[in-house]
Image: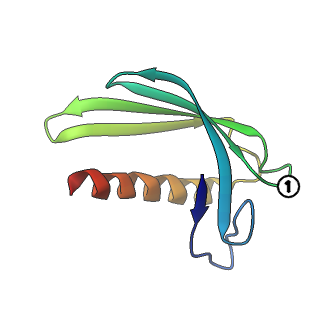
Amino acid sequence: MSLIYKVTDSQKGKTSRDTDVFQGTFLKVVKDTKIVMSVVFDSEDPAFSSEMIQTWYLETVSEGTRVTLICEYVPKGIRKEDHDIGLNSTLENLARFVER
């Protein structure tokens, strides 16, 4: 998958200036409750090229579905502030998509 986005002076892509390319592999899918996947960024910089594990928890709530995302083994080159911004943006985009 490729993610292309606007960058600021303090941010840059892991693959190129405005792009993150990564390979994702589903490790476990539990219907309606959990998705576990391996994510490896395509980067020449070893600070970004290690494997990250994402676990997506899905919980039924009165408003719909609560999605909680836990990331383990985040590559050391990804600053926590940037990672939080990216994850929040991903969850906001998901919410907009499913609420249409």
Mark 1 residue element: loop
Q: Seen from this angle, which residue lies furthest bottom?
A: 9
Name the spot of residue 27 as percent of width and height, x first.
57, 24
Give the total number of marks visible in the rendering. Answer: 1
Residue located beneath label 1 in the image: 45
Q: How is the image coloured?
A: rainbow
Image point 61% across, 58% down: which residue? 2
Name the spot of residue 98 as percent of width and height, x first.
26, 50
Image point 40% across, 30% down: which residue? 57
Name the spot of residue 24 as percent of width and height, x first.
61, 39
Q: Seen from this angle, which residue lies furthest left?
A: 62
Type of amino acid at the residue the image marks with label 1: Asp
Give the quarter of the figure containing the C terminus.
bottom left
**Residue 6 or 75: which is nearer the viewer?**
6
Image point 62% across, 75% down: which residue? 7
Please identify the quarter of the rendering in which residue 52 is found.
Answer: top right
Image point 77% across, 50% down: which residue? 48
Callout 1 crowding tier (Cα within 10 Å): few <14, some 14–19, many ≥20 = few
Please identify the quarter of the rendering in which residue 11 is found.
Answer: bottom right
Please identify the quarter of the rendering in which residue 90 is found.
Answer: bottom left
59 left or right of 63 in image:
right
Name the spot of residue 95 as percent of width and height, x first.
30, 53
